[in-house]
C-alpha cells in the first residue's frame, strides 16, 4: 500500500443528458463499463484495517470485492458481496454510500473516496447479464419462519433464514413483493427489473411469497403462531404524515406515499392505459427535503409538469436528500424554495389553486442536530399550484400492532424490540423502519440480518411463538 500511487479523482460515470432524461423513465446513471470499473477499482488502497467495512451496516468485505474486480475475478467479487448482502443491484443504486462506507474511505482524506456503490452495482449487473445461480441452502432443519413484509428488512431476513436451511414464508400486503423498493422508488432511480431479479433469487432458493396478505386482517397472527416457530415483522413505516394546515382535503393534494405508489406499483404514469389515474399537474409543489421529496418532484416532471418546485423549511445545507439526487433534480429543472413553510392550501372549485407559505429562519439545533426552522413574523407569499405533494415523513402504521395486545410499542407507535430485535412477544422479532422510524435501505437490511441470526438461534433452541 505504501508504494502505491494515489489516484485522487474518481472515474466519472456516464449519465443520461438532463434534457433527455426529464422526459423518460429510463435509468439516469448508466453505470461503469468493464474498463471504467477496473480503473476505479485500482484506486482502492486495500487497507489492512479497512474503515469502509465498519461503515457498511451489513459488513461487506469491500476491499475484497473491489480487488476481485481489479483482477477481473467478477464471480469472486459478487460472491464476497453476497456473503452479507443479497441485494447488491439495489444497494449499488440507492444506498447513501457517501455517508456510510465512502464517508470513511481513507482515500477520501486527500481526494475523492473510492466509488464503492458504483462498483457494487457494476458487478451485480454483470452477474445479472448471465445466468444467476442461487446461493446454496443448508440441509433442511424442519423449522419454519414467517416474515411479515417484503421490504429490504424482510427480504434480507428471509435470505439469511433460508440459507440456514429453514422454511421461510413471506407475507406481503400488496400485490407485488419488494415493499418500498417496489412502490416507493421511481424507475429512473431503481428499475423494477433489478428488484424483481433479486426477489427471483429468493424464490429460486425456495422462499414462499404470499401477496395480498394483510397480517392482522386477512391473515391472523394466531395462524402464524400455530404454523411457524418464529416470526419477523418488517412492515416499515408507511403511514404518511401531513402538514396539518387548512386545505389538505382539496383535490390535487397527495401524500408522497400515495403519489409514488400510484406511479410506481400501479403504473399510473401510463394512464389511460392503466386503471389507476393520477392528477398530472402542470404546476406542482412538493413539500419536504428528503429523497422521497426528490423522487416525487422528478416523477411529476416526467409525467408532464411544466413547473415543479420543492418547498423546504430549512436551508439547502440541512436537506436530508442525497447530494446526487439534488444535483440530478437541479439539472432536470426542479426549482427550490428554501426557508419556507406552507401554512394554507388555497382552493378553487374544490381543487388546489395555490399554496400560501411563510418565510422561515434557522434557530438553535433540534434533537436531530439540524437548526430548527422558526417562522419570520408577518412574511408570507403565495405560489400557484394545481398539485401539492406532501413529503414530510412517515409514521408507524398501527394496523398490525393493534391486533396483538401483548406487542409493546412506544408513544409514536413503533414496535419496541431489545438489542437482539426480539419484541415483547416471545418468538416474534422486528426490525427496520417499524422499530427505528424512517431510515435507509441498508440499515433495514442490517436489522433483517441481525434478526435472522437471533431467530435461527431461538428456533434451534426449541423456541416457539407465544402470544
Image (cartoon, rainbow, N blue to C red):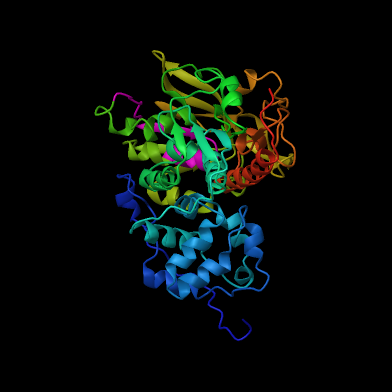
Closest to the observer, 423 or 277: 423
Q: Which residue lies furthest to the bottom in this view?
A: 3
Closest to the observer, 59 or 298: 59
Q: Quadrant of the C terminus?
A: top right
* Residue 409 belongs to magenta span: no
Could you tell whether 39 is left or right of 438 in the image? left
Could you tell whether 154 is left or right of 447 in the image? left
Q: Is residue 251 at least partly visible in the picture?
A: yes
Q: Quadrant of the N terminus?
A: bottom right
Closest to the observer, 370 or 337: 370
* Residue 292 belongs to magenta span: yes
Q: Residue at x 57, y 83 (%)?
A: 4
Q: In this view, does 428 lie above or below 60?
A: above
Q: In this view, does 58 lie above or below 11?
A: above
Q: Position of residue 103 (x, y in %)?
A: 62, 60
Q: Residue furthest left?
A: 273
Instruction: Please provide the residue range marked out in magenta.
Output: 275-297
Closest to the observer, 306 or 430: 430
Q: Where is residue 285 in the image (x, y as percent from the top left)?
A: 45, 33
Q: Where is residue 145 in the image (x, y as percent from the top left)?
A: 57, 35
Q: Where is residue 108 in the image (x, y as percent from the top left)?
A: 60, 68
Q: Is residue 244 at least partly visible in the picture?
A: no
Q: Residue furthest top?
A: 349
Task: Examine the image and state in which quarter residue 100 appears.
Answer: bottom right
Q: Is residue 239 above or below residue 75?
A: above
Counting labels gives: 0
Amino acid at each position: 500500500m505504501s508504494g502505491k500511487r494515489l489516484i485522487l479523482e474518481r472515474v466519472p460515470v456516464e449519465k443520461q443528458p438532463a434534457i433527455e432524461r426529464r422526459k423518460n423513465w429510463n435509468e439516469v446513471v448508466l453505470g461503469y463499463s468493464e474498463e471504467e470499473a477496473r480503473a476505479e477499482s485500482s484506486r482502492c488502497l486495500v487497507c489492512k484495517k479497512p474503515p469502509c467495512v465498519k461503515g457498511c451496516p451489513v459488513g461487506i468485505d469491500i476491499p475484497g470485492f473491489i480487488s476481485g474486480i481489479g483482477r477481473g475475478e467478477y464471480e469472486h467479487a459478487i460472491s464476497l458481496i453476497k456473503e452479507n448482502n443479497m441485494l447488491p443491484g439495489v444497494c449499488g443504486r440507492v444506498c447513501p454510500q457517501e455517508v456510510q462506507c465512502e464517508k470513511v474511505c481513507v482515500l477520501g482524506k486527500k481526494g475523492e473516496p473510492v466509488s464503492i456503490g458504483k462498483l457494487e452495482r457494476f458487478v451485480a449487473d454483470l452477474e445479472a447479464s448471465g445466468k444467476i445461480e442461487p446461493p446454496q441452502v443448508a440441509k433442511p432443519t424442519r423449522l419454519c419462519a414467517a416474515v411479515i413484509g417484503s421490504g429490504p428488512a424482510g427480504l434480507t431476513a428471509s435470505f439469511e433464514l433460508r440459507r440456514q436451511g429453514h422454511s421461510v414464508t413471506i407475507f406481503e400486503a400488496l400485490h407485488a413483493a419488494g415493499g418500498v423498493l417496489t412502490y416507493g422508488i421511481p424507475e429512473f432511480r431503481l428499475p423494477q427489473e433489478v428488484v424483481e431479479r433479486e426477489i427471483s433469487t429468493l424464490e429460486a432458493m425456495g422462499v414462499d411469497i404470499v401477496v395480498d396478505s394483510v397480517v392482522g386482517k386477512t391473515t391472523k397472527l394466531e395462524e402464524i403462531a400455530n404454523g411457524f416457530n418464529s416470526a419477523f415483522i418488517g412492515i416499515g413505516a408507511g403511514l404518511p404524515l401531513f402538514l396539518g394546515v387548512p386545505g389538505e382535503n382539496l383535490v390535487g393534494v397527495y401524500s408522497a406515499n400515495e403519489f409514488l405508489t400510484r406511479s410506481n406499483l400501479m403504473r399510473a404514469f401510463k394512464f389511460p392505459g392503466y386503471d389507476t389515474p393520477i392528477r398530472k399537474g402542470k404546476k406542482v409543489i412538493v413539500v419536504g427535503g428528503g429523497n422521497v421529496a426528490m423522487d416525487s418532484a422528478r416523477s411529476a416532471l416526467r409525467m408532464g409538469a411544466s413547473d415543479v418546485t420543492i418547498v423546504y423549511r430549512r436551508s439547502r445545507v440541512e436537506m436530508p436528500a442525497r447530494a446526487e439526487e439534488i444535483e440530478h433534480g437541479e439539472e432536470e429543472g426542479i426549482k427550490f424554495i428554501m426557508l419556507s413553510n406552507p401554512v394554507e392550501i388555497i382552493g378553487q372549485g374544490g381543487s388546489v389553486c395555490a399554496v400560501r407559505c411563510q418565510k422561515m429562519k434557522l434557530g438553535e439545533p433540534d434533537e436531530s442536530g439540524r437548526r430548527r426552522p422558526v417562522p419570520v413574523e408577518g412574511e408570507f407569499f403565495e405560489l400557484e399550484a394545481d398539485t401539492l405533494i406532501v413529503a414530510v415523513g412517515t409514521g408507524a402504521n398501527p394496523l398490525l400492532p393493534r391486533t396483538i395486545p401483548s406487542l409493546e410499542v412506544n408513544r409514536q407507535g413503533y414496535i419496541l424490540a431489545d438489542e437482539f430485535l426480539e419484541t415483547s412477544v416471545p418468538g416474534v422479532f422486528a426490525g427496520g423502519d417499524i422499530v427505528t422510524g424512517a431510515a435507509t435501505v441498508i440499515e433495514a437490511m442490517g436489522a433483517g440480518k441481525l434478526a435472522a441470526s437471533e431467530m435461527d438461534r431461538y428456533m434451534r433452541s426449541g423456541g416457539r411463538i407465544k402470544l
